Amino acid sequence: MNSLRARLLAATAVLLLAFIVLTGVALETAVSERADQAEHDRLQGLSYALLGSAEITDDGGFKLAPRVLPESDLTRPDSGLYALVLNEDGETVWRSPSLLDPVDMPSLPAVGEWQFMRIYPEKGTLITLSFGFRWVTDGGEDFRYTLVVAEDASTFIKQMQRFRGVLWALLSASALVLLIVELLILRWGLAPLRRLARNLSTLQAHEKRRIEGRYPDEIQPLVSNLNTMLSNDQARLTRYRNALGDLAHSLKTPMAVLRGLAEDQRLEESQRKPLRNQLARMNDILDYQLQKAAAAGKRSLTASISIAPIAEKLARALTKVYAEDGTRFRVHIDTGVKAPIDEGDLTELLGTLMDNAAKYGNGQVDVRAETRDGDLHMQIDDNGQGFGDGSTERLLERGVRADTNREGQGLGLAVAAEIVRSYTGEITLTNCENGGARVAIVLPAG
Amino acid sequence: MRALVIEDDVDLREQICAQLRSDGFAVDATGEGEEGLFFATEYPIDIAIVDLGLPGPTGLDIIREVREAGLDYPILILTARSRWQDKVEGLETGADDYVVKPFQPEELTARIQALVRRSRGWAQPKLESGDIVLDTARQEVFVAEESVELTAYEYRVLEHLMLHAGEVVSKTALTEHIYEENAERDSNVIEVFVRRLRAKLDPEGTRKPIETLRGRGYRLSRGLSRNADATTGADATDS
């Protein structure tokens, strides 16, 4: 019951069921009462007609000539329509030719009263209307009789059953139709929410970090706020990086001047060396901290970017830088490989590692990337001497240098490791088949 | 060899200029983007060193303008921003290499000389023409493996002629590439430099490495055929 649609549908279904049942019961009751009333009226009319043509003999005998009977059904045996007259003692004094077996009436009405009831003889059901009356003869004798008119109820019951069947069938059909319509209404009504959910979940597949499209008034504020948040987030990161860049610029230019002074031959070597070393340390600390601060890291709703164009751009740039060595950068990445990672972070990560590979390799750098189960796997190989034994873990630690002759090596890997860590990924240093160094990175999808 | 330095920090600019001059370059320098752009597009520059963080037109703007103007001399960017996005942007815009501040002065020199050589199609740091060898890294000149002492200007003239070996180089072009913009110029001095060079490179006057083409300029012969002779000659003297 955790979906809006299921909740609404369940509520509607219960409501609809209650409504249909109540409607059915009400309709059935009304119709059956109406039918009883009609039967009552018909039997009453028949009673009046019978009474009108009846004759009572002086000794209290009841006479009714078959030819004067108002309904031909009364004369046909076992026709289903019957009439009989009972005397004060409940004995049958007259019965219509249609009635073959005697009928036991469980109760009789008082004089001048009508009694409408169903009785259940051995077979079938009879609807009866009884009327109690007195008859005063010319001789002044007073007789008390009860006229009973009865009709076989099987037709009536059949009709009612048919009506009931049709009634419930129609009601069930309309309930079903209403449920389907409700389902469609829900689909249509909740479509914008579904679209929003879809857009949110596929946001990572888009290049732009923004929810597109127009939504209903109830949801639009949410979407707008979300978009504002996403773009502010990006703008803040850009501002932050620019500020860090300015900081680097304003610190590193003076450092460059000092570095130049450290080469001044008028200074003693014993003075120049510490100056150089301290400047190198300052630079490393500054670089490491700036790079770390500028890394965006894992953020929610990050747009996915294609890996190949960035790797290729870096390869072009680095080919220029390493033109002297003739280093070849080969990018083996399908254009479809995408991952939700910040472009700046990815450029930094690949740039650092490809630069390292070129520095330590022997003219050949291979970059691979693919997605497996949503995780991004990247691999940067060179054809150099590979990583030495045992020192690989230390290389990933901050500021450790494997080779003090080359500036920035230890730092480069430490910076890369920092970025990978900010995406809760893994970085491993191994050697590839040809003996060169291999840096393997896994950035998890979620 | 004429270099342009565009760097807004005065101290750093002067340091780089001093270093480049000691490496045998004629150097023009400025700290302003506008002026830098003018120099970069109007002067006969052999290499430009451009700081990316300039006030006014940025380093990137200058590089873009230079490349749009169809100029293809090498450009080295100096940047304090060590982020790859900045470096890649500079290289994609048209720069050929970068040096991140703070840098080792030797590294800057090495990068600059590599760029200049590559732009002339030389794969080695040594320029060779016949038995004349010019080591750009150490700024030394050898004739038949004998070291020859040259003044800074003589070195610049020879370097320029060697970089354009086989081509006719006019006196004006030579002047422009060996003098800085605000230096006193006299194209007659070029004749003096060439005469002295000839005397130092070919004291016996037998090989005549620098031809004079009247009214057009000078030409340093590629010396491919004479290269073989020179080698045998050298072997002969050794043995």
Image (cartoon, rainbow, N blue to C red):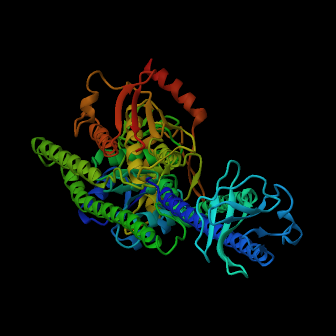
Question: Is residue B141 at all visible to an observer of this figure?
Answer: no
Question: Is residue B105 at all visible to an observer of this figure?
Answer: yes
Q: Seen from this angle, which residue lies furthest top?
A: B239
Using the rendered view, name the quadrant where residue A160 is placed.
Answer: bottom right
Q: Is residue A290 left or right of residue A190?
A: left
Q: Is residue A57 left or right of residue A242?
A: right
- Check the picture and name the quadrant holding the C terminus of chain A: top left
Q: Is residue A141 left or right of residue A332?
A: right
Q: Tell which of B190 and A84 is nearer to you.
A: A84
| Image x and y of residue A422, in percent | 31, 46
Q: Residue at x 62, y 77 (%)?
A: A112
| Image x and y of residue A372, in percent | 49, 36
| Image x and y of residue A361, in percent | 41, 31
Using the rendered view, name the quadrant where residue A281 is placed.
Answer: top left
Q: Tell which of B201 and A281 is nearer to you.
A: A281
Q: Tell which of B179 and A40 is nearer to you.
A: A40
- Residue B53's place in the image compared with B162, above or below, is below
- Residue A352's place in the image compared with A224, above or below, is above
Q: Residue at x 27, y 33 (%)?
A: A395
